Amino acid sequence: MIWDIYYKLIDDDYINEKVGSRIKFYEYPETGDVSGPHIIIDPIAPPRPVKNADNKRIVYEYFYQIDVWSKSINDTENVMKSVADVLWSLGFIEKGSGIDEFDSETQIYRQAKRFIGQFEKIKE
């Protein structure tokens, strides 16, 4: 699922224009390396089976936190809006209130939201 999210994010025209290749998993940027907006995809928990049929797990729940870091409040807000739209299109919903902060020392704006979704397991 993490790759589905990644590819959908880079397919979004606005995100691709603003963020480019600065989409990472688990890795937060060094504060001095925030030359443009960054997106960080961070799983909160491993996939969890939530529905079974015929003694097989068929539906899994996925829980992610997505962070946007930028030196521009507008870029941070607009990229996060696009991220939320992309996750919604995949079938995720927002969970909780999120984080919206500014670090005056580094001059970095950060928004973080958590997304949860349930999806059928694809047969391999």
Image (tube, rainbow, N blue to C red):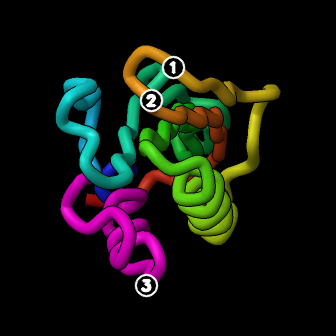
Q: Point out the tag, 3 or 1, that comes first from the N-terminus.
A: 3
Mark identifier at residue 107 = 2
Q: From this view, report whether residue 100 is shown above or below residue 124.
A: above
Residue visible at 47% across and 78% down? Answer: 14
Picture quadrant of residue 13: bottom left
User: Could you say which is closer to the camera, residue 3 or residue 35?
Assistant: 35
Q: Are marks 2 and 1 in contact (CB under 8 Å)?
A: yes
Taking 71 as reference, is 20 above or below it? below
In the image shown, does 36 or 106 lie closer to the viewer?
A: 106
The residue indicated by pointer 1 is 103
Task: Give the amino acid type for the residue marked by disc 2 in the picture.
Answer: Gln
| Label 2 to label 1: alpha-carbon separation | 5 Å
The residues bearing labels 3 and 2 have C-alpha atoms spaced at a distance of 26 Å
Residue, disc 3: 13
Q: Identify residue type, mark 1.
A: Asp
Residue extent of the magenta highlight: 4-22
